[in-house]
Image (cartoon, rainbow, N blue to C red):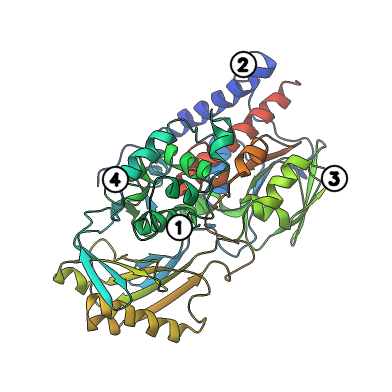
């Protein structure tokens, strides 16, 4: 595909610095670009910025700092790899299958721009052909044409309601208190949707936000639909929706390329255990590799993960309560079956399989762009299958055979990634916020606390929870840090 000419490096730095100056001018008056240049700390042991987390948010923030001319920063990552909730299975011969986040779609311009800058190509998600729905002994095959068979009238009502719920601050919606009393399931019942009619609606919500309608706050769901141009279909569909496009090389490649650019400023296997003096000029971060001192800290973590860090002094009550109450009970498990080729396409099937009451929420074609291998991925509820890989492989192969034929019984590879078990640094893939959460705790999500700047996809103004939201939050956090540094450099 054609790539745009990369922007001039010096121009990008000037733009970022100007943006930082703009942030400062709101509180300190106009300052010159020269005055607002990032200052190097007089104490060389004190970094300008420490970033916690080497996922898309943290690495985007670090990359922006570097492009703006700030060299005094470090990225601290607890895992032994970068990428956060994106991770690629290596299938050999340059082919990967994503175990975590993988799709982008219309309106997700921040991550699309990042991919172009990093010279990472994209390709369309495969959805052509019939989807198979299994329910007990019943089997139905139907072409959903890039959707998932949901109710158009309900989708339209959700889109209309979402217009009044700003994604950046759902708690400020005109009817926030009323909407935040309901679960999505409550609302569906009010619309007269019965369980059997609402199966696909519930499936979509569970795949996008990690919770069944009975667990998911209506206000929260509407705020996410608001991100998608107030279009339910744009959020939940493949064709024209947020699952429309994949990255060549898998989504983790974005983080890998950014980390390669940043070099030894990224420290792996370096969890932060304690943050001291966040209310002072110099903050101390106690890690497994020693103490890091910095003037500002970008915390690019899921709010629930912040509970694994000891804050000294304790955080203000509002922020502390938000972290404690943030749901951490929605891990996801993804499996991968690899075949010599995507044989299901020959028979007119899309590779999508939905199993009512079974272990397969959704299986889908995750083959590489050239179809050189056939790859079926599945979302599997944690605890629905044994942990022993061979048993899982056989069970799922039998489900696929019922849907697609006996060729599905002969995979050449099998991979299994349970995000609730792989490490202590994930907890969950997405955040199904319950009713009552946003109106009580939302105001504490983004405001800085002392020298702490909050980042991560959960803090994004739009597309919160998506990879695009992570990138947006990284850009915002970098501008906040640059603004603070510029503020300091002019003695304000």
For marks 4 and 2, give the CA distance. 54 Å
246 in relation to 133, above or below: above
Label 4 or label 1, whichever lies nearer to me, is 4
Q: Are marks 4 and 2 in contact (CB under 8 Å)?
A: no
Determine crowd level at label 2: few under 14, some 14-19, many 20+ residues with C-alpha closer than 10 A: few
- Provide the secondary structure element on which disc 2 rests: loop
Disc 4 to disc 1, how far (Cα)?
18 Å
Give whichever of discs 3 and 2 has the lower sequence position.
2
- Label 3: how many Cα within 10 Å (few below 14, some 14–19, many 20+): few
- Mark 1 lies on a secondary structure that is helix
Q: How busy is the neighbourhood of tag 4: few (under 14 within 10 Å), some, or many (20 plus)?
A: few
| Viewer-nearest of discs 1 and 3 | 1
User: How far is mark 1 from mark 2, CA to CA?
Assistant: 50 Å
Compare marks 3 and 4 and give the one earlier in the sequence: 4
- Does residue 438 appear left or right of residue 156 in this picture? right
The residue to which callout 3 is attached is 313
Q: Which residue is mark 1?
A: 206
Along the polypeptide, which appears first: circle 4 or circle 2? 2
Reading the image, the residue beneath label 2 is: 32
Image spot of residue 98 (x, y percent)? 41, 63
Residue located at (50% from left, 64% from top)? 332
Mark sitting earlier along the chain (4/1): 4
Residue 281: percent from left, percent from top: 81, 35
Which label was assigned to residue 90? none
Could you say which disc has been placed on residue 152 in the image? 4
User: What's the distance in space between the residues labelled 1 and 3, CA to CA?
Assistant: 38 Å
Q: Position of residue 257 (x, y in %)?
A: 46, 53
Image quadrant holding the C terminus, namely top right
Find out whether the residues at labels 1 and 3 contact each other: C-beta distance under 8 Å. no
**At 66% across and 20% down in the image, what residue appears?**
35
């Amino acid at each position: 595909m054609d790539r745009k000419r990369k922007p001039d490096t010096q121009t990008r730095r000037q733009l970022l610095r100007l943006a930082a100056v703009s942030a400062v001018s709101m509180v300190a008056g106009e300052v010159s670009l020269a005055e607002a240049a990032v200052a190097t700390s007089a104490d060389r042991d004190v970094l300008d910025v420490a970033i916690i987390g080497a996922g898309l948010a943290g690495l985007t923030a670090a990359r922006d700092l570097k492009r703006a001319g700030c060299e005094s920063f470090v990225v601290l990552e607890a895992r032994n790899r970068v990428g956060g909730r994106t991770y690629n299975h290596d299938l050999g011969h340059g082919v990967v299958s994503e175990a975590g986040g993988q799709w982008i779609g219309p309106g997700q311009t921040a991550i699309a721009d990042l991919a172009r800058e990093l010279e990472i190509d994209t390709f369309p998600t495969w959805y052509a052909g019939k989807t198979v729905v299994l329910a007990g002994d019943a089997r139905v095959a139907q072409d959903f044409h890039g959707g998932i068979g949901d109710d158009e009238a309900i989708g339209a009502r959700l889109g209309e309601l979402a217009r009044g719920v700003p994604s950046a601050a759902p708690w400020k919606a005109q009817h926030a208190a009323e909407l935040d009393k309901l679960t999505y399931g409550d609302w569906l019942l009010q619309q007269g949707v019965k369980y059997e009619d609402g199966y696909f609606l519930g499936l979509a919500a569970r795949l996008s936000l990690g919770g069944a309608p009975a667990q998911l706050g209506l206000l929260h769901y509407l705020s996410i639909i608001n991100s998608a141009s107030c279009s339910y279909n744009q959020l939940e569909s493949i064709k024209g929706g947020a699952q429309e496009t994949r990255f060549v090389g898998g989504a983790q490649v974005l983080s890998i390329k950014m980390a390669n650019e940043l070099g030894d400023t990224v420290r792996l296997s370096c969890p932060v255990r304690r943050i001291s003096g966040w209310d002072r000029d110099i903050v101390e971060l106690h890690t497994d590799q020693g103490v890091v001192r910095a003037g500002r800290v970008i915390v690019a973590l899921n709010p629930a993960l912040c509970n694994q860090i000891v804050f000294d002094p304790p955080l203000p009550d509002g922020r502390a309560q938000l972290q404690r109450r943030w749901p951490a009970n929605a891990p996801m498990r993804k499996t991968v079956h690899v075949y010599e080729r995507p044989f299901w396409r020959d028979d007119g099937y899309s590779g999508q399989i939905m199993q009512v009451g079974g272990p397969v929420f959704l299986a889908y074609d995750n083959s590489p762009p050239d179809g050189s291998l056939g790859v079926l991925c599945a979302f599997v509820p944690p605890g629905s299958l044994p942990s022993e890989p061979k048993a899982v492989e056989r069970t799922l192969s039998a489900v696929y055979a019922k849907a697609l034929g006996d060729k599905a019984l002969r995979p050449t590879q099998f991979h299994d990634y349970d995000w609730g078990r792989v490490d202590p640094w994930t907890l969950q893939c997405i955040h199904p916020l319950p009713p009552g959460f946003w109106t009580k705790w939302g105001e504490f999500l983004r405001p800085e606390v002392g020298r702490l700047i909050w980042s991560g996809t959960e803090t994004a103004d739009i597309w919160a929870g998506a990879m695009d939201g992570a990138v947006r939050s990284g850009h915002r956090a970098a501008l906040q840090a640059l603004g603070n540094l510029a503020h300091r450099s002019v003695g304000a």
